[in-house]
Image (tube, rainbow, N blue to C red):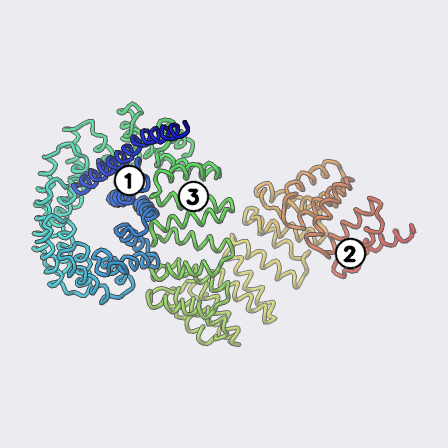
Amino acid sequence: MKAKTLKFLALACSILLVPSLVGCKGYEARKEAYYEKGKTLFEDGDVKRARLELKNALQIDNKHAPSWYLMGRIEEQNRDLRKAYASYQNALENDPDHTDSLVRRALLLILANDLEKATKDVDRVLAKTPNHPDALVARASLRSRQGDSAGAEADARSALATESGHVGATLSLASTLSARNEYNEAESVLQQAIELNPDEAALYLVLGRIQDTSGNVNGAMSTLKTLTEKNPDTFGFKVRLANYYAGHNRAADAEQLLRAALNQAPGDSERQRALLSLLGRVHGVATVEDELQSMLKQTPDSANLRFIQAGLALNNQDKSRAMQIYEEIVESANGLGPDAIKARNALAELLLRDRQFEQAEALVKTTLEEESSDSDALLLNSVIAMQKKDYDQAIVDLRALLSERPDRLVAWRMLAQAHVVRNEFDLAQDALDKALELAPDDQVSQSLLAQLKLNQGDADGARSVLESMAEQAPDNFGIHQALARIHFAQQDWGALAAGGEKLQETAPDQPLGPYLEGLGLQQQQRHAEAITLFEQALELRPRATEPLVALVQSLLAAGEQDKAEQRLQQVLKSDPGNFTVLSLLGNLYFSSGDIDRALQVTRTAVEQNPQVPTAHVRLFKLQATQQGEAGSVETLRRGAQVTDGNPLIMFELGSALERIGEYGEAIETYDSLLQKNPQVQAAVNNLAMLLATHKTDQASLDRALDLAMQLKDSDQAVFIDTVGWVHHKRGEYEQAGVYLQQANEMLQGNAEMSFHLGMNYLKLGNKDEARKYLNVAASSDDFSGREEAQEAIDRIAGQG
């Protein structure tokens, strides 16, 4: 019985297993069928259908490396290199030795300038197959990037020896030969490859470029014409030939070629746009407008033509006409569909330029209600959110955009900026890394990265980024100025001088180079050399302020006070009201002890520059050295009147009035200042303290508290102390203690703050703590309230 049972089970198992084995073989066959069909379609150029077949193969077997490889090739043709790289990665994860994927991944890594990783992939292939032509071409590209022209040529020739006519090897060798001006041999190599690959467009394109570079215009035209004839359905080749005709005095042939192409497809927007573009370059705007009107008569409902019409209006600075056209496009589409979305986005962008944020936001909202993933609308919405300081919304919009369109460089930049505002530096760094993967030489992203590193305190990292940028753009002053700031902050005076010298080589007619070099030498106490360079900068730009200031500093440091004075007087002859020069001259006289001449020059500065607030403040401070603040404060009163209450002068006036005991006028001055400039926290602080200290009525104390509450979250100890003292003067001692203790912890040992805290402890009945802090105040010779502090200590002692 037992044997029969076992026999039955074995038979049952065999019956059950047969269909499963047949099914496995069936799946394998279907996978291979999908793959082979996809491969055939790809080779025939039908990438859309090829993708579908390969997806079917991968649904059956998600680890099928050949299918992932072909998916990568398709993504490359679609110019989505990120997805292509991911596909090759998938192929290699499932088959680490998949040679074709290794080569293609290496080529993508070379494009991304990741030469180290690319070298590893190429070496793996060549270690296994030393004469692999594709790998040799990849290594040729690597060697070319590394400046090894001979090595690149050797690899290309080796690849051609292995596979005659190899397209990649031919292009590599032709490029190397062309770079050495060996145009005849480069042409010969390409012609041989064309005989073996008569339908390979890349060979014709490179041949035409080399013929053009060598001056063989007729040869280049013939090559491009052959390419066009071989590919009659590829309109881009016709545009290339037409542009070449137009650039070589054959505009009529160019126009004839594009009109013939348009006649083959009269409503094709790409062909219409190409013809209009050519007419604009050759004949001007009027001809384009006439042609556009003719096209609109034939196809009046063409939204593409209306967009071109709007673009022309913008080129003619007629923004209102462009907006009208966009509105008409929206209306014609009944507000729906891709044309309406595109027109609304264009309208919103124009409104944003005019800072009409509400109207722009309404248009963008309408678009996103219809198509929530529209990338342009999401970008515009993020711009609006950033303007409103709604960084959370901006980040949400930008990430939604980038999930669909990771190729939008501007979106990565904006995302980085939004994260920086939120102090999310790691996320900002990640966004900028993505931006630079897309465009390694993008200077805007590089500048943002340098600034980010500075924000994080990584001056060395910022310097490295800027130095790389300077190599790419040696004439960019902004980069050199940013580098100079870092060199100055790091006190790397040698680098500062060297940077200035390098800039002089690239831009000898600009003063920045000699100025920066002189600044570096000045900090090394090499004043004689620095003086020569500053004078050189001033010769290039006589009215430049910075070199003049630096020149005077070096002259004074070298003991050449007379020369410094003469140089300044020389400038004043041609520019008698120059405030910078008058200020330098006044400082020079003051430092030498000649107060009368310093006053004379400073009065001239005020007379010549009555609207410059610092002129009045300088005069007041000089006068105060002779006649005291009480006798000089009228200068600040006049300055405030002349400058219509400039906040700098008003604050200086209020402070001076406090010091001379004119508390009522000081209060009025700060009040007047804050009515126009409520954000000046120092004035808020001083007014709150004056009201609390010198007023006893409830209204004044209430006003003092209102002002103090603006300061309660400050990181400035003196402001926190004021909040506490206002509470103290209002009799709110418990609340006062919280702020006064915080202020003392922020700035320990300050006499006035110790006095305030001690007096508050006295009111709270804590004599020991009161005595401790009052002792600090009483022992300070500079504290005006030390006698009051001592009296309080004596009272505590008298009370036992």
Task: Give the residue at x 91% y 52%.
Answer: 798
Q: Amino acid at mark 1?
A: Gln
Assign a secondary structure to mark 3: helix
Decide which of 517, 577 is in the foreground and name it. 517
| Real-space Cα separation, disc 1 to disc 2, in angstroms | 69 Å
The reply to whether residue 363 is in sight is: no
> What residue is disc 1 on?
317
Q: Nearer the viewer, mark 1 or mark 3?
A: 3
Name the element at disc 1. Answer: loop
Tell me which label, 1 or 2, sits earlier in the chain: 1
Which is more N-terminal, label 2 or label 3?
Answer: 3
Who is closer to the viewer here, 417 or 305?
Answer: 417
Rendered view: 511 above or below 395 = below
Q: Position of residue 340 (x, y in %)?
A: 30, 28
For disc 2, the neighbor class at 10 Å (few under 14, some 14 to 19, many from 20) is: many
Q: Which mark is residue 415?
A: 3
Q: Name which of mark 1 and mark 3 comes first in the sequence.
A: 1
x and y percentages locating residue 75 in the rendered image: 27, 43
Residue drawn where x is 66% and y is 64% of the image: 626
Please, is residue 320 above or below residue 762 in the view? above
Q: Is residue 192 above or below residue 346?
A: below
Horizontal relation, residue 498 to residue 267: left or right: right
> Between marks 1 and 3, how big is the CA–CA gap?
31 Å
Q: Is residue 675 visible?
A: yes
422 left or right, relative to 413:
right
Mark 3 → mark 2, Cα distance in angstroms: 52 Å
Name the residue tied to disc 2.
777
Amino acid type of the residue that numbered disc 2 sits on in the rendered structure: Ala
For the point 69% across and 54% down, which residue is it?
Answer: 747
Q: Quadrant of residue 633?
A: bottom right
Q: Is residue 367 left or right of residue 196?
A: right
Q: In this view of the protein, which residue sits in the foreground, 500 or 271? A: 271
